């Protein structure tokens, strides 16, 4: 039985989320808190397997509650927010930065289109996140030193790579933050990213990441010319690829691996246009999206990187790539920027 604490300032929403979650016989809501302060107090006496956390609440918002819980009594926290207000979305990603493991749109009422799919996503995410091993987050300035390592000592002279492609899913945003914040302004190749994320949160995530990277960052536009040292994110509900001449091509083709945009689609497109002149990176996420295509990139001679198991929230996508021998390197996020810098010819 998976024990859940529901945190939301609306009594109606708390009951509604309880109803959805307990429609699965493996889930039981053991508590409900009306704000972040009540959630922190609840955690002093009971330990749920997962917390669903609203953001915009009185007394203490979801970001602050997440920070305190992850520093004191860490458990997996799923942000469940209905607001696309810029400030609320920013606080949602601050909560991710503080240790929350996923972010979802709050399901609309039963009469709304998409209710069934949103409810299933909430239940499946809560069940999956209950298995995630979380660690205590240390207050700023008190983080203990972490050891890092490489698992492959591939030797290569720096070369003129045409593109870096990155795929991420569950647990991806803070990993992308760690990687993109470590890449310097002079980086010579464009970077194209597919991040599986609930509809409506992509723009807020890009705004959040823009605050920590020296590189320009934007959501990809169909027909846009790739520019060196620019980060592009695949837009909601569009596969994103590249055509000859280095232009972005968006597509409404059928979902792959149950998702659109798909990492597999991006990697395959990069391989067809640039071949070995690509660096492919596959990060934390459930499923297998992009894993076989990372292997194809490596087989063609491209350099490929998979996130290591120890740092992955879910070692599904990178784990499958490692199983297929699709990764030239298996690295924790903090080692990836340095590896990229060592592989490319500087501008």
Image (cartoon, rainbow, N blue to C red):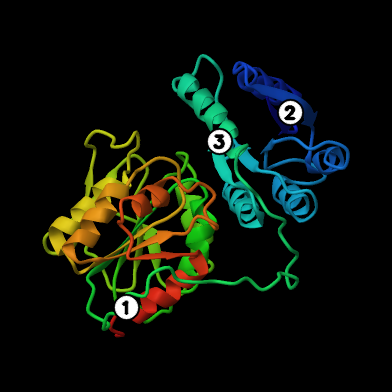
Which quadrant of the view contains residue 103?
A: top right
Query: Residue 192: percent from the left, percent from the top?
Result: 32, 60
Numbered label attached to residue 128 = 3
Residue lying at 53% horizontally and 67% vertically, measured from the top left: 211
The quadrant of the picture occupied by the N terminus is top right
Nearest the viewer among 201 and 277 is 277
Q: In the picture, residue 57 is in which quadrant?
A: top right
The front one of 170 and 230 is 170
Q: Where residue 152 appears, x then y in whole percent?
A: 38, 70
Q: Which sits in the foreground, 98 or 309? A: 309
Label 1 – label 2 distance at C-alpha: 51 Å
Q: Where does the image place residue 295, in percent across and percent down from the top left?
A: 26, 54
Q: Where 87 falls versus 331 (above or below)? A: above
Tell me the CA gap for discs 3 and 2: 25 Å
- In the picture, measured across the screen, residue 145 lies left or right of residue 279, that is right
List the residue tagged with mark 2: 10
Specify few, some or many for label 3: CA neighbours under 10 Å numbering under 14, 14-19, or 20 or more: some
Residue 224 seen anywhere in this rendered image of the structure: no
Marked residue nearer the N-terminal end (3 or 2):
2
| Discs 1/2, front | 1
Counting residues from the start of the chain, the first of labels 1 and 2 encountered is 2
Residue 241 lies, in percent from the top left, at: 22, 52
């Amino acid at each position: 039985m998976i024990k859940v604490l529901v945190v939301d300032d609306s009594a109606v929403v708390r009951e509604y989320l309880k109803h959805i979650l307990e429609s699965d016989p493996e889930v039981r809501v053991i508590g409900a808190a009306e704000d972040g302060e009540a959630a922190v107090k609840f955690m002093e006496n009971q330990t749920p397997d997962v917390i669903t956390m609203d953001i915009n609440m009185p007394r203490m918002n979801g970001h602050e509650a997440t920070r305190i819980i992850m520093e004191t009594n860490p458990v997996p926290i799923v942000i469940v927010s209905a607001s696309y207000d810029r400030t609320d979305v920013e606080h949602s990603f601050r909560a991710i930065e503080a240790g929350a493991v996923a972010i979802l749109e709050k399901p609309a009422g039963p009469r709304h289109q998409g209710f069934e799919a949103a409810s299933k996503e909430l239940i499946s995410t809560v069940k999956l996140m209950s298995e995630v091993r979380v660690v205590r987050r240390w207050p700023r300035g008190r983080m203990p030193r972490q050891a890092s390592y490489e698992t492959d000592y591939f030797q290569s002279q720096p070369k003129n790579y045409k593109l870096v492609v990155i795929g991420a899913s569950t647990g991806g945003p803070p990993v992308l933050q760690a990687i993109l914040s470590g890449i310097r302004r002079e980086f010579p190749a464009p970077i194209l990213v597919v991040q599986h994320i609930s509809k409506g949160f992509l723009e807020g995530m890009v705004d959040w990441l823009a605050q920590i990277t020296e590189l320009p960052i934007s959501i990809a536009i169909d027909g846009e010319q790739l520019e060196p040292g620019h980060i592009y994110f695949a837009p909601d509900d569009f596969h994103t690829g590249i055509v000859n001449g280095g232009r972005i091509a968006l597509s409404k083709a059928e979902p792959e691996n149950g998702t659109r945009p798909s990492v597999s689609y991006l990697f395959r497109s990069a391989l067809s246009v640039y071949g070995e002149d690509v660096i492919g990176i596959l990060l934390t996420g459930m499923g297998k999206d992009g894993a076989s295509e990372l292997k194809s990139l490596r087989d063609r001679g491209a350099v490929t990187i998979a996130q290591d198991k120890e740092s992955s929230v879910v070692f599904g996508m990178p784990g499958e790539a490692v199983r297929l021998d699709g990764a030239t390197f298996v690295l924790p996020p903090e080692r990836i920027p340095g590896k990229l810098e060592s592989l490319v010819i500087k501008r």
